Image: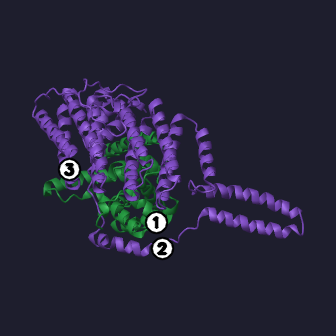
Chain colours: A purple, B green
Amino acid sequence: MSKEIVDLLADCLEINDKKGAAPLDYRQQAGERSAELEELVRLAETLKASPQVTPTAHFRAQARRRLLARLPERAAQPSRLREALTALHQLSALFAYKRRFSLAPLLLLAITTVLLLSVGVVHASASSLPADTLYPVKTTLEEMQLALAPNKIRYGELHLKFAGRRLEEIGILSQYGPGEAIPMTVAYYVNHIEAVQTVVTETPGATDLAETFNHVSSQQEIVLAHLQQSTGATVGVDEALIAVARGRSVARGVMLGRARQPAAQAQLRLQFATDRLAAANTFAAIGQVELADLALIDYSLQVEAAVYLVGQADQDHRQELAGLMAQTLTNHETVLAQVGTRVPNHSQLALQHAREVSAHGRAVVEAVKQGASPPPRQQPGRPENRPGNAPANPGHRPVTPEPPGSRKIIILGEA
Amino acid sequence: MPAGYQDMPEAKLVTRAIQGNKEAFGDLYEMYLNPIFRYIYYRVHNNADAEDLTETVFLKAWEALPAYQISEAPFKAWLYRIAHNVIIDQYRLFRYESSLESQPFLYDDELGPEEKATSQENNERLFEAFSQLEPAYQEVLSLRFISGLSHAETGSVMARSAGAVRVLQHRALHALRNCLEKQTKQK
């Protein structure tokens, strides 16, 4: 089987997954197999268009109540540390009792106990928190896993996994109010995120990891924003927010490098814009106005870049791309209106700018749809390639060059 | 749907559900009821079975939640993984056969009578071909195109790498195309 056709098909479907567009610049690359590629893509689209079946209305009406009634109560789980200590205490008592009678069985018991405790301690350490006695066991095990990682990508994946653990720990710790353990855990979290960023930056072929990193960092940003908002914790959380924003920026750079053509890059930019707009909406909903502003600024930059790339796309795909963008930007208008109801009046500058950029983008792509050439326009800001940031596209094919920019907007983590 | 549910990020709901909050789990249930039902329905081809199995998936998810770690896999992929296992268990008990009475590709109420007839005929052929594919092919097509999961998410559900999913997807679409061609020749 040709690896090339597998990847072309997957890339093509991936783009369609995101935007529902027809395949763009892959037909040429497929050469004599372009007919086959198109047929398979069409088949996939037919499957996607299969009717949206749902449970019956009767089932849906009762579903939640019935399920909740069937859920067994989950007893509060005793701390594994406490369990381990209790077991240790009981074994010690047994040992003291036996000492008075014989030594041989005691030796056997001691060996068994050490073995059992080793397993128990490792197991118990999994749920330990930074302030717990067993926490160093947990971090040592993680370090061992990192040291044994068979390659750089796995190493990066492990750091991303451990960053998720640190975030969970921060969440639990913050429920007990501020404490010294929180800033320390945030620092560990930032270290993990930076390590992933380094792997993504320096390892050719880490595109899947970059995609996951982009997705996870956006999710974690929202969790951090919630933590900050609900607990009022500021120590270190700002730093963590900057780290995830920077990581996301680097991951995007790698993703853009993988998308070889302007049309594909435009679609990615549009996807980033959609993600940022959703984040802005969430931030606005939870009262994180400043983060909402930053997300909106980022949104505007991504839309500007996407619109610019429409002009760079070859004639064959330009109209198709314009149609897709027009539809997406129209959808954005609804979300922007929703954000408008959530952002206070004194902080609507970024929103206003985002609306203008979106409206301008729509006007441009509508004109392109009618057959007009896209108007020349200054290069939009490129957050991924600003000075002071890690290289946006390390070890990968270069991103389609954009003309020199004039706008200077500071984005979280990209100043 | 409870008020405020749309504004609460999934991760927070999941964290609360892990801590034993049934209402948070109820919110997650409402979020994922339709997608999980759809995924199951296209595999078992029967509405009542799909409803029962959907509920089973969420009961199992509730039991397994204390062991779930947000950092291990996205909640959606984790849930689909449970659904995948539930379907496999169900396959061990019953062998699902396609039947004209329960073909999910048949219905589309938005079409006119003539279009509906053509669409039904095409869908019937597609479904027949789909149901002849080996389970792994059905699985990858179902997760990718009916449930809309990404390559990485599908890999997470099927315990394969994203690269392996890309290859499997290509083979599955090829197999489906071959089945459809075979049908045409037979007619």
User: What residue does disc 3 label?
Assistant: A346
Amino acid carrying mark 2 in the image: Pro
> Is the same chain shared between marks 2 and 1?
no
**Residue A218 pos. (x, y %):** 37, 46
B76 left or right of A402 in image: right
Q: Determine the residue positioned at 13% across, 56% down.
A: B112
Residue A47 visible here: no
Chain of the residue displaying label 2: A
> Which mark is nearer the camera, 3 or 1?
3
Q: Secondary structure at mark 1?
A: helix
Amino acid carrying mark 3 in the image: His
User: What residue does disc 1 label?
Assistant: B62
Q: CA distance from mark 3 to mark 1?
A: 44 Å
Neighbour tally class for label 1: few under 14, some 14-19, many 20 plus, Cα within 10 Å: many
Residue A296 visible here: yes
**Residue B41 pos. (x, y %):** 35, 60
Neighbour tally class for label 3: few under 14, some 14-19, many 20 plus, Cα within 10 Å: few
Q: Secondary structure at mark 2?
A: loop
Residue A72, disc: 2
Amino acid carrying mark 1 in the image: Trp
Chain of the residue displaying label 1: B
Looking at the picture, tell me which residue is in the foreground, A338 or A7. A338
Q: Determine the residue positioned at 40% across, 72% down.
A: A68
Looking at the picture, tell me which residue is in the foreground, B49 or B161. B161
B46 left or right of B88 in image: left
Neighbour tally class for label 2: few under 14, some 14-19, many 20 plus, Cα within 10 Å: few
Looking at the picture, tell me which residue is in the foreground, A54 or B187. A54
- Callouts 2 and 1 close, C-beta under 8 Å: yes
